[in-house]
Amino acid sequence: MEKLTILLVGSGGREHALAWKIAQSPLCGRLVAAPGNPGIETVAELRPVKATDADGLVALAQEIGADLVVVGPESALEVGLADKLATVGIPCFGGSQRAAQLETSKAFTKDFCQRHGLPTAAYGVFENAASAGAFLDTLQAPFVIKADGLAAGKGVVIAATRAEADAAVVDMLGGRFGSAGARVVIEEFMHGEEASLFAVCDGKTAVLFGAAQDHKRAYDGDEGPNTGGMGTYSPPPVLTQDLIDQAWRELILPTVEGMAAEGHPYVGVLYAGLMLTPTGPKLVEYNARFGDPECQTLMLRLQSDIVPILLAAAKGELASVAPPQWRDEAAICVVLAAEGYPDAPKTGGVITGAEGSFDQAVIFHAGTSRDAQGRLVASGGRVLNVCALGATLAEARESAYGALSRIGLPGGFHRRDIGWRALQRV
């Protein structure tokens, strides 16, 4: 196969991990990232086109003669980038605007689950506080309140009391998340442990693409507000092969088949957030892209060349490529966040020590940029992803935290207990 020109869309830690892995492929002749970040710039050309500028990205793909476009963030799917690329004949690894509703609208997904009999929590969808309150009357605490649309991983409130639930409903409907909160989804609380399962899809075929376990809360001991994710590890011991097989039969395959039957064939990553309940895995939510920071651990563990898999999925030819092969090692990712994250992160802090040499760790840039003096500075809430492989999770964890101790960010913070669930089982 001739070498390919690949356009990668996005600028976060997930995209740096994808760029790092794609650049290793012997099939990658030229890698361009838009808009990228200083870490991605070490392996790709950067172009200043935003992930939500679908027309600008199509023009860029045409300009460079892209053979494949790989979409990182859900925001690009929501604005219809894949649809616009299809009209000019450029293969895209990422779902259509309609297919991406599995992430961009929680109400769509819950209704889809109901139509196809997929195991998930009981729910209601509401546009006013009075009707939401009536539904809350039928449930018992704790209550799960979600903004319908995209809210950067922060649009979910687990309310311990009815007063907290009512306040969350009013807050979301009152505009905290803009149009994303114009509707709220209220769910019964599911008991169990959460885990993430990934599949790569081409519209008709789905291939298992690993699993991970995230840490959503901001602080140690799973305390504090929900975030986009403070760290992750793979593989998660709690997600046994039997549970993976059950989730595949009862969730992944029916979803791929159902979306195709409804005229929205699903292409790209199907990321199932699972609750491992006493009666088996149930769907918490779907995401239409690799998780962030789950992707970082998957890329470290992936032994196969990723480019043939991405290209085959984009072209509807996934059945013709070998399934991905994985390293036996465990991988971990620890997020270094800016002071004030997730509510009001402080940007502009100078980062030190992140661009040195790390024997046992890999640093993926998330919210970073350069200031006028060329210094690496924080430009987002989640700033760096410090990742490592190890023969055991404990070894990987030691390497990641050792590397993190060499990095400085004024006011920055990280969780010190990433991986605690798995390590507790050892």
Image (spheres, rainbow, N blue to C red):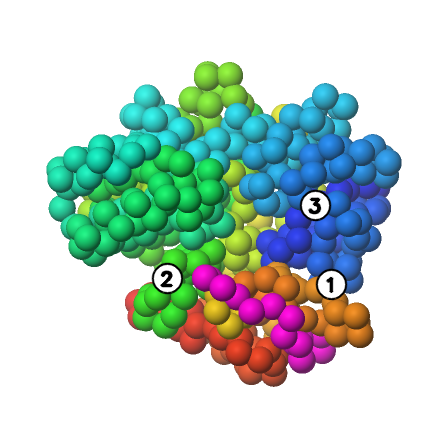
Determine whether the residue tagged by mark 1 lies in a helix, strand or loop. Answer: loop
Q: Which residues are magenta?
A: 342-358
- Disc number lying in front (3 or 1): 3
Judge whether residue 211 can be spotted in this image. Answer: no
Position in image of residue 94 (x %, y %): 61, 35
Judge whether residue 65 can be spotted in this image. Answer: yes
Q: Which mark is residue 225?
A: 2
Quadrant where the C terminus is found in the figure: bottom left
Q: Which mark is residue 50?
A: 3
Reading the image, the residue beneath label 1 is 38
Q: Which mark is residue 195?
A: none
Residue density around tag 2, few if under 14, some if 14–19, many if 20 or more, within 10 Å: some
Distance of mark 2 from mark 1, alpha carbons?
Answer: 29 Å
Name the chief secondary structure element in magenta. Answer: loop
Kind of residue sitting beneath label 1: Pro
Q: Earlier in the sequence, mark 2 or mark 1?
A: 1
Q: Is residue 192 above or below residue 65?
A: below
Q: Who's the residue at 19% across and 39% down the image?
A: 133
Quadrant of res 343: bottom left
Mark 2 and mark 1 in contact? Answer it, CB < 8 Å. no
Quadrant of res 362: bottom right
Residue density around tag 1, few if under 14, some if 14–19, many if 20 or more, within 10 Å: many
Quadrant where the N terminus is found in the figure: top right
Kind of residue sitting beneath label 3: Lys
Q: Nearer the viewer, residue 354 or 409?
A: 409
Q: Who's the residue at 32% across and 21% down the image?
A: 115
Residue projecting furthest to the front: 174
